[in-house]
Image (spheres, rainbow, N blue to C red):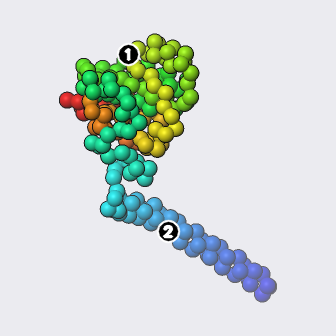
Amino acid sequence: MISKIETRSEQTQFAFVSKVTFMMFTAIFVFAYWLIPVFQQSYKPAEYTPGYTAQATNDPSLGTKAKSIEHLTFLSESKGAAVLLLSDCSDCNRAKLETLQSAQLPEGILKIAIIVDELDEETIADLSKTYSPIMILEGTSKIVPEWNVFFYPRLYCLDSSGKYIYIQPPSESFQRALIASKEVWK
């Protein structure tokens, strides 16, 4: 008879410890679920910029000259350019080129697409013909670090002297960036 009481007592103790442990973990998780977002909202380091990733801090500064396209003399004859950098994914590029082609940018703004890939002259001519008035250019891998291209497609707006006046942030879609770029030239 004594052994049955001790067994029940051990079972009761185990159940009690299990319940208390479960309640403690539940309380900790509920508290952490509430507390962590509070700290995340209130802590912002000095270099915090909303919507940007750490890589975006390496973007060229607005107002600096775009180095890789200094040879494009026709830029000075325009009011500026919307420059779209594209990857080597030809299927992905077609939809973006169509969007850029149909974009209603202010008069005098050039539309330039730089495809970071080795393209033959025939492909460039075909794309230029298909997506006129967009100027299709071949970009070298050198342009990627200079322009800090860490996602594709990425839109850059240049003034007539070739200086950056808008760079698409990673938090914006290409379509949203096109809308924002129209405001830059007003």
Identify residue for label 2: 28
Give the image location of residue 102, x and y in percent. 37, 18
Give the image location of residue 13, x and y in percent. 66, 79
Q: Nearer the viewer, residue 29 or 22?
A: 29
Give the image location of residue 176, x and y in percent. 35, 32
Q: What amino acid is at disc 1?
A: Pro
In the picture, the quarter occupied by the C terminus is top left
Single out the residue that lies furthest toward the top. Answer: 129
In the picture, the quarter occupied by the N terminus is bottom right
**Could you tell me if residue 41 is visible in this image?**
yes
Identify residue for label 1: 133
Q: Quadrant of residue 169?
A: top left
The mark lying in front, picked from 2 and 1, is 1
* Relative horizontal placement of residue 25, taking residue 170 as reference (left or right): right
**Alpha carbon distance from label 2 to label 1:** 61 Å
Q: Quadrant of residue 183?
A: top left
Q: Residues within 10 Å of mark 1 (few under 14, many from 20)?
A: some
